[in-house]
Image: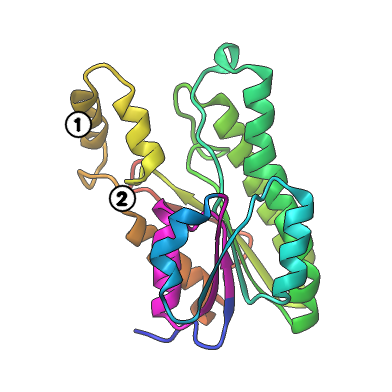
Amino acid sequence: MSGRLAGRTALITAAGQGIGHATAQAFHREGARLWATDIDEDKLAGLAALEGVICRALDVRDPSAVEAAATEIGALDVLFNCAGRVPQGALLDCEPADWEETLRLNVTAMYRMIRAFLPAMLAAGGGSIINMASVVSSLSAAPDRCAYATSKAAVIGLSKSVALDYAAQGIRCNALCPGAVETPSFNERFSALPGSGAARAAFTARHPVGRIGSPSEVAALCVYLASDEAAFTTGQTVVIDGGLSL
């Protein structure tokens, strides 16, 4: 199937790599007019040559930058809040500065993005908001992920709140909850461990499907959530984890 997002305007944060980058490519293939943003504009170089894709730097932690982007871009049909960080550490290992930065990027920046772009979406008759959460949240626990899990649980709460408050005005909002996916942050986690190859193999073996996910698989789910096929899907924690949380 193709053209599912034809005629629609979408914005993706953290489009320079990983899930954000794969989703930008998928949205483009499906016909969307796309704003691809990232804090590091150099990472967007591979998208800049695509017809209908506009690349710009955006630090979602900066309120003035977010407001400027909303003024420049106007109404969106799809907003994918993908930017985030994956800090490690149990509670006693999590310093206050790391805790605050995690909540600032993973939750507060998402709140600001929705708050900035939502009025124009409402005025245009609605749209789809996809927020990057995780199975490591209120859904399940993982070792040494205190700040991360807390932030992603908050994303689920934010998504459900937005979905309920604005459903009658045409807004759909869902929390995307991946498990382990082959992204730079996933690879960095294992590269820092002693015996990283064995540790990675043991982790992968725990999955019922015998592997971790790919960014393109998550991107395909994002296309569905952005499209009319998901017209009756809102306020959901949409899990894609290869069955690990079963």
- The residue depicted at 56 percent of the width and 33 percent of the height is 149
- The residue depicted at 75 percent of the width and 83 percent of the height is 124
Q: Considering the image in quadrants, where does the N terminus appear? A: bottom left
Residue at disc 1, secondary structure: helix
Label of residue 201 in the image? 1
Q: Considering the image in quadrants, where does the C terminus appear? A: top left
Q: Please say if 112 is above or below 70.
A: above
Measuring from the top left, give residue 199's x and y in whole percent.
24, 24
* Residue 34 in the figure: left or right of residue 239: right
Residue sitting nearer the eye, 241 or 188: 188
* Residue 140 in the figure: left or right of residue 150: left
Residue sitting nearer the eye, 50 or 157: 50
Residue at disc 2, secondary structure: loop
The residues bearing labels 1 and 2 have C-alpha atoms spaced at a distance of: 14 Å
* Residue 140 in the figure: left or right of residue 57: left
Q: What stretch is highlighted in magenta?
A: 10-39
The residue under label 1 is which amino acid type?
Answer: Ala
Q: Name the residue under label 2.
A: 213
Measuring from the top left, give residue 136's x and y in whole percent.
49, 37
Measuring from the top left, give residue 242's x and y in whole percent.
31, 49
- The residue depicted at 80 percent of the width and 80 percent of the height is 123
The residue under label 2 is which amino acid type?
Answer: Gly
Q: Give residue 81's quadrant in the image.
A: bottom right
- The residue depicted at 68 percent of the width and 51 percent of the height is 110
